[in-house]
Image: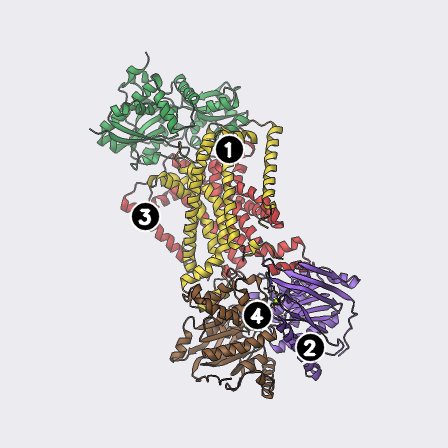
Chain colours: A red, B yellow, C green, D brown, E purple
Amino acid sequence: MSTSPLRWLLPLGVMAALVLAWALAVKLNNLPPYVLPAPDTVLETLIKDRAVLFASMLVTLRTTLIALALAVAGGVALALLFASARIVEFSLFPIAVILQVTPVIAVAPLMLIYLSTDTAVLVCAWIVAFFPVLSNTTLGLNSVDPNLRDLFRLSGATRWQTLAQLKLPTALPYFLGGLRIAGGLALIGAVVGEIAAGSAGQGSGLAFRIVESAYRLNIPRLFAALILISLTGILIYAALSLLSWLVLRRWHESELGGRT
Amino acid sequence: MSTSPLRWLLPLGVMAALVLAWALAVKLNNLPPYVLPAPDTVLETLIKDRAVLFASMLVTLRTTLIALALAVAGGVALALLFASARIVEFSLFPIAVILQVTPVIAVAPLMLIYLSTDTAVLVCAWIVAFFPVLSNTTLGLNSVDPNLRDLFRLSGATRWQTLAQLKLPTALPYFLGGLRIAGGLALIGAVVGEIAAGSAGQGSGLAFRIVESAYRLNIPRLFAALILISLTGILIYAALSLLSWLVLRRWHESELGGRT
Amino acid sequence: RAADKVTFGTNWVAQAEHGGFYQALADGTYAKYGLNVTILPGGPQANNRLLLPVGKIDFYMGANMLQAISSVVEEIPTQVVAALFQKDPQVLIAHPGVTAFEQLKTRTLFISKEGLASYYQWLVDAYGFSESQVKPYTFNAAPFLVDKNSAMQGYITSEPYAIEQQGGFKPTLFLLADYGFQTYATTIETRNELVKQNPDLVQRFVDASIIGWYNYLYGDNAKANALIKQDNPEITDAMIAFSIAKMKEYGIVDSGDTATLGIGAMTDARMKGFYDTMVKAKVLEPGIDYAKSYTLQFVNKGVGKELAPK
Amino acid sequence: MAPRAVSDGAPLLRLSGVGKRFSNAVTALEGLDMEVRQGEFVSLLGPSGCGKSTALRLIAGLTEPSGGRLDWGADEMARRAREPHAIGFVFQEPTLMPWASVFGNVHLPLKLDGIGRREAEPAILEALELVGLAGFRDAYPRELSGGMKMRVSIARALVTKPRLLLMDEPFAALDEITRFKLNNDLLEVWRRLRCTIVFVTHSVFESVYLSSRILVFRARPGRVSAELVIDPDQPRDETFRTSPEYAGLCRETSLALARAMDAT
Amino acid sequence: MAPRAVSDGAPLLRLSGVGKRFSNAVTALEGLDMEVRQGEFVSLLGPSGCGKSTALRLIAGLTEPSGGRLDWGADEMARRAREPHAIGFVFQEPTLMPWASVFGNVHLPLKLDGIGRREAEPAILEALELVGLAGFRDAYPRELSGGMKMRVSIARALVTKPRLLLMDEPFAALDEITRFKLNNDLLEVWRRLRCTIVFVTHSVFESVYLSSRILVFRARPGRVSAELVIDPDQPRDETFRTSPEYAGLCRETSLALARAMDAT
Ligand SMILES: Nc1ncnc2c1ncn2[C@@H]1O[C@H](COP(=O)(O)OP(=O)(O)OP(=O)(O)O)[C@@H](O)[C@H]1O
Ligand SMILES: Nc1ncnc2c1ncn2[C@@H]1O[C@H](COP(=O)(O)OP(=O)(O)OP(=O)(O)O)[C@@H](O)[C@H]1O
Ligand SMILES: [Mg+2]
Ligand SMILES: [Mg+2]
């Protein structure tokens, strides 16, 4: 199923159809480029400005990946802490929720007082991305088959063994689901972080390109940057889906896709 | 378990400890209010400016709830569409990912060309919140017990019946997990949307209060607004957790919490 | 004849820097000129600018000439028809110890992304500032207050007030305009098509706005301030007073050419000078037909000059 | 006891040379030939893992054969037995919906058929009564013992009064007395509904007591290795269970099973 | 056959007046008195839903009694049987980890005991060989038939050579021949390890064949209603299975079971 070429061709077809619709919309309504640039204009810009845009993309991608890694580490670590006892979960979850709903845009300046710019951007991206990992992993850790839990208890499994060999595998499909959400959020978080706390000028990420293009009303370039962000997002999502498939294909319904 | 007073007292205790630590940090380091205001200063501001702050909170809360409702509707509807066939899922998921990773901050000005301010804010909040619902519900819909699926097939269940009576109940715990993530995100989304596309001045939400307080260096008020946002977030999370408990307590492990 | 309905979009929440427009609205000058004006305040990020070319608003309050020239580059059919601020209110704000502009070169500077994309490039070129000393400014002065060895950007009419209140000291201010950043600011932009098809309407709006500014600065501005406070309840009388005082002290609105040409004045010479400086600083490309970004058709007529104190 | 309705012997379905290979290269069935006739009570007997459940799933159309063919009889009866709702299936595992009560689980097939709670109630209660669970109608699956879960699953299969009943070791988790009672109840249902039953069991005694025909499977690859026919008109009761014929038939079946296992 | 090691008869554990009430107000057990002696093979027999599984879970310490007391013997043997790893449990459902192969599932209790893959391999293969699944070591649970899953679960319980083995209908899903073979294998294991076995079954024949003592449960509330003792020194083989004593014991047990059910 996953090797069928349709799996790749169809999404590409849908994307092509979307781009076509976009091109037609621009053409038929005679939209000026500052309202909605045509796809070819955007592509041209993308190629023309590739040096500066790709450099920025790499910066943003780097932040995203580090933030995602930290989100996974932090989210899973917290989930494990919460799973140690329900009472810990009740006590600390409100703090996690506070972190999640804190508008990074608002607190970024305060962070800048004590943190370097790069760290502040990372913290922003992390705050945005860690919660789905935490929440889904906690849900998974709490969904253990009670009979298996009993088996582990009987076998004299230590807390740590129960965790590593029972709870974590059970939580895996939930965790991977949370990871797929967090992937995109880490990217948005990186962009928002760059906007809120990021350095500008040379060597800065896609967010600065977007703000700069908006300031200069260079809308085609703004769209080129947006498209790079979308592509990055799709790539991250595809990579995480592949990971999920590799890990779960032998045993979890969600990746078996119906047996014959 | 859920009726034990500890369930409420402990989180409150932890919060109290946090506030105390905050107060001490301010006192011992002699921090000026524009860096970190003391909790009592913030509380004072909260009481003094309650009229304007609570009015703003209601505006933001309203946006959040509408966005959350739309996120649920949209996320579930898309998940159902995706569940109709794996091929649909492959084809359309990239679009969902694009929507998720689109930095609303960047596109909000473009949205304002065609949408009214309120609608634009809503769309921003929706974009941020819908993905976890979609992603988790899709995961849930794909995790159906294969034997039960066979049973439905044998009983001549229609597509619609299988959906309503098998897939949706199976997906429920996953969906509710996604909802708890989306609740907080809808709130952030509303705040970011207000910042990106929101009208300012009268009748505007907490985001505007924050930006404006920051601009005027009225940091105690900024913190008062932040605290209102955190409280709103915790309230939403608590409400969604309660919902989850009510719905799942009779049958799902995650809400049973170990049987005796 | 019914009054023409027009919408004027600003680029920030209502404040004293928009006073002249509110004045014309409050004291009936717009009405007298046959205009039924709605003022649409902007916000921290809300971008009313794109609403102009697509026709959702008729006039837009441009921040400075850089954006107007960008519009030419991007072939956006808008132009500046009046410049109400002769000097850009952009300042660099430093702690009291700083005495000379050059000293800022060794300090950490909090500059916004927009600033970095515009005037900062000129500072680099003209004064040898460097990008590496910049930290992002996000419209919150706390980082500046904490770091005694820093300076930050700001509007002369607003940030210094908050800093005086919260920091408890009078900061040193360097108005960029006084150091050679000679863009006009707080302009009125409109669509080329409106200029061509209904110049009378444009002229009436420009004239009424100019009169509004004279009255706001030199007449009874109580009603205008009431309107401003209605649109933005957060603002206080003290803030408004501070802003007006600074506008007067630094000649933001009424200085230089306005003595002869009246408020709103623009000249080709100054535009050329500005463009050349910006090209040299690599903020703008050479070869842009910058003259398309403005027109002198509606200003320099001395309208309302009689309202200024002698 | 009334003489039972004689099956008219017309074929309901026939598997010819059916094979089933799973994607992990395990060959569960190969060259399976078997026939099910209308109104029959056929038991499938065979070693663990020989493909009985797989054969049942093939008949139900839940999986496709990877070789050979499955043909349904051409007449009206066969056509009607293939309709949705006409097949009742008791899976080897209880397969209950964890979110529904016992009542809700048994209601399911009727609900899918458009029959509301109120209207279905008598049939549901009757089925629950039959399996001795009338007192547990509001319990949830996780509150039931293993045997009780299986009985809910049996009630669910019977509640629709199916024309073709496929049962995969339905009574394995039950004590002998309950099992004997349900054996008789099942025979009663079979007679009353004149339905066809394909029954997987591990109990030689049970297969002899219940069926009109026993198919003994051998393993890897699974196929029919012996067939025993038992007079369908033989009354099935305690007299039969203690009769020498019964003992003889059991011995014969056990031998066939032993031979099937040796062949592997 | 060598005479089996005689149990020394010291009590391993005793349940006195034990009750178990679930949160949904179902009383599974009430006033349950029973004793398990060291080295014994005790079978629990009783109607479906009478609390056999609950009693087993109580003994294993997986659930707390809501009334009465559970006392363990005071001597060294009893102490050692309570150690972790010393109890083997076969659940009524297979309870396999879906993410691990057959090998991995059987490895689990050893792994939890710190014994690595390499070191554990001989024991694992031996256990798999015993249940006839050596060829399926790399299969995943979802690729197994119902009986095969149950056998994996049995192999997992045996692989640690436990001192106390609690088995909840381990052979219910198996064909008679496999079942007979495993019956004998289990007796062999019991003799070799000199362990204590508490065995839940629904088969009267099996209980008589295997046990040295049979406890017959009655239902709602569950408690012991009869006790049958079978000479532990009686050799268990085909001769025994076809002997008149065996038939007599079976009849007696069936009667006790029938009386237990009538009492309900
Ligand atoms: N989904 C599957 N994937 C791979 N192999 C499978 C699958 N299902 C069953 N098998 C294999 O097919 C064979 C037959 O399985 P089946 O379930 O039909 O046996 P059975 O006769 O019902 O056994 P039991 O009496 O133990 O239930 C077994 O060897 C099993 O390993
Ligand atoms: N978790 C639970 N919550 C509520 N009631 C339960 C629970 N587990 C078991 N029961 C009830 O306790 C009683 C005894 O259950 P138990 O599983 O011990 O029966 P059993 O003797 O093992 O039956 P079987 O032979 O069918 O497995 C049953 O009536 C059952 O409904
Ligand atoms: Mg089977
Ligand atoms: Mg049981």
- As shown in the figure, which amino acid type bears the numbered disc 3? Ala
Given residues A236 and D13, the one toward you in this image is D13
- As shown in the figure, which amino acid type bears the numbered disc 4? Gly
For the residue with label 4, is its CB less than 8 Å from the closest atom of ligand 1? yes
Task: Say the numbered circle drawn on residue C244.
Answer: none
Secondary structure category for the residue under label 3: helix
Q: Is residue C279 visible?
A: no
In the rendered image, which residue does mark 1 sit on? B224
Of all chains, the one bearing label 4 is: E
- Calculate the distance from the C-alpha at mark 1 to the C-alpha at mark 4: 61 Å
- Calculate the distance from the C-alpha at mark 2 to the C-alpha at mark 3: 82 Å
For the residue with label 3, is its CB less than 8 Å from the closest atom of ligand 1? no
In the rendered image, which residue does mark 2 sit on? E209
- Calculate the distance from the C-alpha at mark 3 to the C-alpha at mark 4: 57 Å
Vertical order, D156 against C198 (above or below): below
Q: In which quarter of the view is residue E87 placed?
A: bottom right
The mark closer to the camera, 3 or 4, is 4
Position in image of residue D223 (x %, y %):
53, 79
In the rendered image, which residue does mark 3 sit on? A23
The mark closer to the camera, 2 or 3, is 2
Secondary structure category for the residue under label 2: helix
Q: Residue at x 74, y 71 (%)?
A: E192
